[in-house]
Image (cartoon, grey):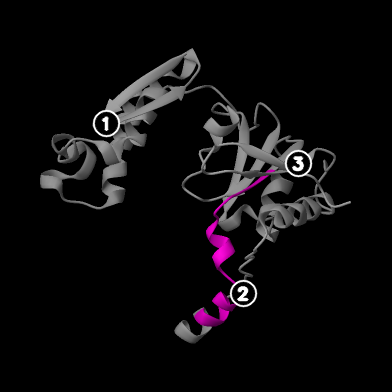
């Protein structure tokens, strides 16, 4: 079933199960915030009195609406599909819609680039050993900001603040190759129980399609 919400000239389509109707209705409002009429934008429930307040204030107002319609789905912390998705934090990736996922289906772990770092392995280890996931999906995307950075970013920060970050930038110029590296990092981690179903993809931000990347031979 599909619900259509029109704000200004934009139309959003949100798929959902009947048990999540109230949640989906509120999500449509949240997705179309930027297209709201001036009257709605000035509402105290979305942006504070007389249009004042920060983006966070407006989001808190939308959360109030969400909470009013929210019902406890009665789930526990274990993902229904026993899958963990590691992806870039890019705002153009709507993982649940792109993969047809529902609330409670998966774990989502996101960072700049969607790269497999020590902290991602920490989350994956907890996901598998404590919460029962078995499959891992890795998603990079086209036109990623990480492709315009280098490890020199750390030196620039050091010159600016007087301290070099302990973390690596994990910049890359070839998304396909970085997906392969990420797959290898997952598959060779001694902490993970399940490494037989690890697959990597590049999401095209212009078409919405996933392109699978085969692991290194």
- Residue drawn at the location 29% of the way across and 25% of the way down: 6
Q: Nearer the viewer, residue 26 or 10?
A: 10
**Residue 181 vertical placement versus 43 (above, below):** below
| Of the image marks 1 and 3, the number of the one nearer the N terminus | 1
Magenta residues (range): 138-156
Residue 88 in picture, x, y percent from top left? 57, 50
Query: How many numbered marks are there?
Result: 3
Q: Report which quarter residue 9 is drawn in.
A: top left
- Residue 199: assigned label: 3
Q: Residues within 10 Å of mark 3 (few under 14, many from 20)?
A: many
> What residue occupies the far left of the structure in this picture?
50
- Residue drawn at the location 48% of the way across and 20% of the way down: 16
- Residue 161: assigned label: none
Residue 48 falls left or right of residue 102: left
Residue 69 falls left or right of residue 165: left
Residue 18 in picture, x, y percent from top left? 47, 13
Residue 99 falls left or right of residue 24: right
**Residue 112 vertical placement versus 73 (above, below):** below
Q: Which of labels 1 and 2 is toward the front?
A: 1
User: Circle 1 is placed at which residue position?
Assistant: 9
Q: Nearer the viewer, residue 125 or 177?
A: 177
Q: State the separation of the CA atoms marked 1 and 3.
A: 38 Å
Q: Which of labels 1 and 3 is toward the front?
A: 1
User: Circle 2 is placed at which residue position?
Assistant: 151
| Of the image marks 1 and 2, the number of the one nearer the N terminus | 1
């Amino acid at each position: 079933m599909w619900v259509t919400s029109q704000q200004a000239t934009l139309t959003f389509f949100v798929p959902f199960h009947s048990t999540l109707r109230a949640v989906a209705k509120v999500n449509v409002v949240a997705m179309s915030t930027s297209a709201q009429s001036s009257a709605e934008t000035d509402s105290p429930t979305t942006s504070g009195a007389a249009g004042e307040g920060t983006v966070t204030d407006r989001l808190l107002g939308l959360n109030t609406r969400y909470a009013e319609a929210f019902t406890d789905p009665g789930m526990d912390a274990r993902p229904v599909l026993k899958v963990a998705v590691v992806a870039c934090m890019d705002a153009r990736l709507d993982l649940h819609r792109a993969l047809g996922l529902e609330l409670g289906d998966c774990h989502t772990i996101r960072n700049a680039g969607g790269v497999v770092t020590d902290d991602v392995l920490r989350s994956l280890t907890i996901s598998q050993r404590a919460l029962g996931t078995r499959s891992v999906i890795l998603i990079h995307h086209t036109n990623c900001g990480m492709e315009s950075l280098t490890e020199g970013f750390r030196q620039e920060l050091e010159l600016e603040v007087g301290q070099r970050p302990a973390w690596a930038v994990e910049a890359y110029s070839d998304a396909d190759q970085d997906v392969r590296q990420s797959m290898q990092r997952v598959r060779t981690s001694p902490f993970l129980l399940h490494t037989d179903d690890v697959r990597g993809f590049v999401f095209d931000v212009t078409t919405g399609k996933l392109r699978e990347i085969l692991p290194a031979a």
